[in-house]
Amino acid sequence: MRLMMYLALLTAHFSYAQENINPSRDSLQIDPLLIPLIDTALAPFYHGVASGDPTNNSVIIWTRITPEKELEELPVMWEISENRFFDPIIKRGSSSTGKFRDYTVKVDVTGVESGKRYFYRFSYDGKFSSTGTTKTLPENPQKMNIAFASCSNYEWGYFNAYGIMAKDTTLDLVVHLGDYIYEYGVGKYGDTTIGRLNVPSKEIVSLQDYRTRYSLYRLDKDLNKVHESLPFVTTWDDHEIANNSYMHGAENHQSATEGNWTDRRAAGTKAYYEWLPIREPSDALYRSFGIGNLINLVILDTRITGRTEQIYDHTDEAYENESRTILGQRQLEWLKTELQSHHYWKIIGNQVPVGPMIVPTREGKHPYMDGWDGYPAERNRVLHYIKNKQIKNVAIVTGDYHSAFAMETPFSDTSVAVEFVVPSINSSNYDEHTDSATVVQAKNAYLAYNPHISYCNLQDHGYVKLKINKESILSEFVYITTKTEPDHSVKSTNRFEVLSNSNKISEQ
Ligand SMILES: [Fe+2]
């Protein structure tokens, strides 16, 4: 029954798409299956605009042009202003793109002022893009409001959480912790009854596959809107390439049928850099952003840079081997330097839970082996360093887990940091797969097995907003009402405070 329903939906989806292809647009540089999703009034800037990686005096601005025929190279103009009327234009310039980078455009706008909101837009062939707003980092902020997001899956429903974020005029920045896309084919991981089906329909492996999947996601109105409204700082988790990835492979990569890992990783990372507003060139994704003397925003890559292969059985003799790494030597040494920075808060944007995460199962319990739990030697190196060097005010913000947690990070009988694990934008957690009684049971078990965890929500979706000043961090979990239809209402929020120099979390 389930299979028949899925096949019917799939057929309906494809035939709808094909009927709507205008013959004169056969050569439009977008997957034909995406044509029904585009708003023709936006031509040729169907994917909107985005900005990211702001510094005191620069910011990346991004767009994608969809030309009506294949072009090796095409020119594009850009301009920025302090007002939405572009009067006066304070900076303008030209750039180019083409087939070689999937017609995406990225400009590093330099020489702008710190702590300012700017309006920006692109033009090509006499047409303007939508107008984006962005903010440069302030030089000496008293406070910053940063949203943290992870795990948005097109098939699991509407990106209402992004829509809510886009309307929050108090936000300065969005940090995306990864699983910005998912690699699966139609129906493999999602709810196809909602009617948002993956394109391509198969699992993405080639460069063109990854590009098309980003194109699908970026046609989503909510994701489009939040990019248009706020600058992003992004890092990837596993699904930007394949589930449970590490340096040399992934659980969801089979070389026999999907080619060699190096090619797939190169395809996934090239498409990521093309479609996300990240500064290029960069020899590594991990990087940091100093925000006055208030925050050192430290962004990790715990997937591709230095992660050795997962061991899924914690009784395996090699589990605690010192040679197993999640950061790798170079990133670890860099992190130590970043932790020593002069900033009041060291906010670590991270993929998988750092603190112990004992997972309850039907058979009992086990550590979360794809998280830092799976790399105890590396975790000890980091936490020992924090304790030994008496580094204060480390707040870790984590994605990947699809559920919400607030915890104090234990090490050697004390708490050395705090950690907030953010809920997914919409990827499934417990209630999509179990009944409500089981959700309650699981929650109780998490709290019992993990005494350092003070808060746990296994069933809601949304994001976390941190309000940061010198005295404290106020962490707000923002939950959506539904993901099965467009709806920008907030179902509920939970707030927690971390006072400076405390490493303690208290519910507000
Ligand atoms: Fe995820």
Image (cartoon, helix red, strand yellow):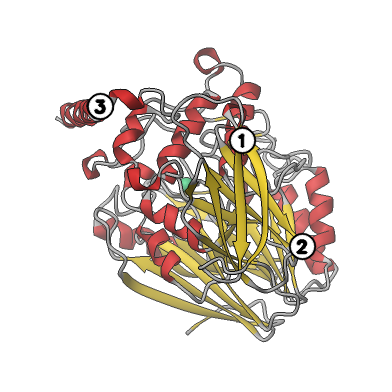
Residue at the (72%, 63%) spot, across then down: 55
Residue 397 screen position, x and y as percent? 59, 62
At mark 3, the secondary structure is helix
* Label 1 or label 2, whichever comes before in sequence order: 1
Mark 3 and mark 1: Cα distance apart in space = 30 Å
In the picture of the structure, the residue carrying the numbered disc 2 is 111
Q: Position of residue 125 (x, y in %)?
A: 51, 40
Left or right of 76? Residue 11 is left
Q: Nearer the viewer, residue 276 or 319?
A: 276
Q: Nearer the viewer, residue 254 or 27?
A: 27
How many numbered discs? Answer: 3
**Which label was assigned to residue 14?**
3
Q: Residue furthest left?
A: 1
Query: In the picture shown, does residue 333 fall above or below 83?
Result: above
Image quarter of residue 415 = bottom right
Type of residue at label 1?
Thr
Earlier sequence position, callout 2 versus callout 3: 3
Residue 353, position as x, y percentages in the image: 58, 55
What is the three-letter code of the residue carrying label 3? Phe
Q: Which residue is mark 1?
A: 97
Secondary structure of residue under mark 2? loop
- 444 w.r.t. 352: above or below: below
Where residue 106 sits, quadrant-wise, is: top right
